Amino acid sequence: MQLAITIVQLLCCLAIVVIVATQSGDVEGINVITGGNDNFMSKSKSRSLDAKLTKATKWVALVFVVLTVVLNCI
C-alpha cells in the first residue's frame, strides 16, 4: 500500500513540474504601479489554456499534499 501511494505521489510530483513548466510567464500581471491591462484577452482568461493549467496545478498540488500527509501518518 505504501509503495503504491509513493508511486502516485511521484507521478503527481512529475505532473506538477510539467504543468508549471508549460505555463507562460505572468509579466503583464505585475503592473502594480501603472495599473492592470484590461483588454479582451484578460477578460477571457478563465477559458484560456493558462487558466486550465493553473487550475490543474492547484488540484495536483492538493493531491500531492494529501498523499504526503497520508504517507507521513503510515
Image (cartoon, rainbow, N blue to C red):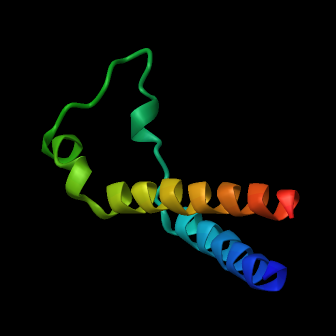
Quarter in which the C terminus is drawn? bottom right
Q: Quadrant of residue 8?
A: bottom right
Is residue 35 placed above or below 74 in the rendered structure? above
Residue 26 x %, y % = 46, 45
Q: Quadrant of residue 13?
A: bottom right
Label count reads 0
Q: Residue furthest left?
A: 40
Q: Residue at x 46, y 30 (%)?
A: 30
- Left or right, 51 with respect to 20, comes to left
Quarter in which the N terminus is drawn? bottom right
Q: Residue at x 74, y 77 (%)?
A: 5
- Left or right, 66 with respect to 53, comes to right
Closer-to-camera residue (45/57)? 57
- Left or right, 61 with respect to 9, comes to left
Is residue 32 placed above or below 40 in the rendered structure? above
- Left or right, 74 with respect to 59, comes to right
Closer-to-camera residue (47/39)? 47
Closer-to-camera residue (17/8)? 8
Q: Residue at x 69, y 55 (%)?
A: 65
Residue 3 x %, y % = 82, 84
Is residue 19 placed above or below 39 in the rendered structure? below
Residue 25 x %, y % = 49, 52
Q: Residue at x 53, y 68 (%)?
A: 19
Q: Quadrant of residue 68?
A: bottom right
